[in-house]
Amino acid sequence: MATFVLVHGAWQGGWCWARVAALLRRDGHDVFTPTLTGVGERAHLVSDETDLAMHIEDVLGVIKCEELSDIVLCGHSYGGMVVTGVADRAPDHIRSLVYLDALVPGDGQAALDVLPADIAAGLRDSAVDGKVAPGPAEAFSVNGADCAWVDRRNVAQPLKTFEQPTQLVSGGAELSKRTYIYATGWVPGLGQPFFERYQHQSGWTAISVPFGHYVMIDRPDELARMLMSAI
């Protein structure tokens, strides 16, 4: 059996993994779905200090306090920024690293650097009091039955989390098993450049799936199988 740590993307919280986590636990796996500071049920903790580094510390804290090792670490969307920093800081605790339609930064890159320029500009321009409101679930091709549920739960995200560059202590963790899952069923399809980069790169498995961006909500069964294949 494996241990999974699943890191959500911007505006969301650990709640978005509930369906996938239930399936993995049913099969006997341990699953942790931390909510990053300032969003989800931790939205009341948001402050001017909430940034990418704090979110990396959130996940490192779970690994330390739960004494986790040999984990499958998965980051969705903005969560790719977080898991990149976590893998760099705690590579000995990680069995496999999975990017779910996620951003994959290099050293010194912020989320705004790896996003398409028009989307990055839109995030900057839309910020109010240092926070960026979530886009509607429909824009991410969430299934119609769940759009209202997602919209009720998503909250504004601090702009600083998108602005702060990644600082890799080791220059980038070189793990033996890394997977990129590209969701092709929505526009703009943020995963495309990363999928194209890694599909022929040694040490990576790159998969494309015809789903919307929130795969964990729309296709939990398929995602659970993909995560188990990353063990």
Image (cartoon, helix red, strand yellow):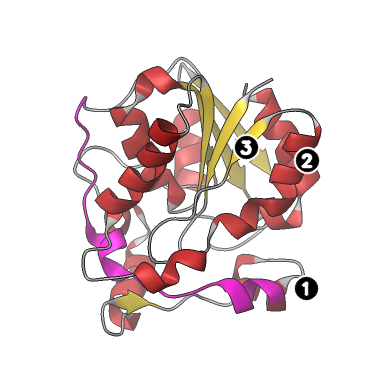
Residue that extends furthest to the bottom in the rendered view of this protein:
128
Q: Is residue 11 visible?
A: no
Q: Which residue is drawn at 71% across and 41% down?
A: 223
- Displayed quadrant of residue 152: bottom right
Disc 1 element: loop
Q: Is residue 123 visible?
A: yes
Instruction: Give the labeled residue for mark 3.
Output: 31
Q: Report the amino acid beneath label 1.
A: Gly
Is 165 covered by the magenta stretch? yes
- Of labels 2 and 3, earlier in sequence is 2
Q: How far apart are marks 2 and 3 (CA)?
A: 10 Å
Graded by Cα atoms within 10 Å as few (under 14), some (14 to 19) or many (20 or more), the crowding at tag 2 reads: some
Percent position (x, y) of residue 66? 47, 33
- The tag on residue 144 is 1
Percent position (x, y) of residue 212? 67, 58
Q: How far apart are marks 2 and 1 (CA)?
A: 22 Å
Disc 3 element: strand
- Of labels 2 and 1, earlier in sequence is 2
Q: In which quarter of the image is the C terminus?
A: top right
Name the front one of labels 3 and 1. Answer: 3
Q: In which quarter of the image is the N terminus?
A: top right
- Of labels 3 and 1, earlier in sequence is 3
Instruction: Give the labeled residue for mark 2.
Output: 23
In front of the other: 25 or 181: 25
Q: Report the amino acid beneath label 2.
A: Leu
Q: Residue at x 38, y 66 (%)?
A: 38
**Which region shows up in magenta?**
149-170
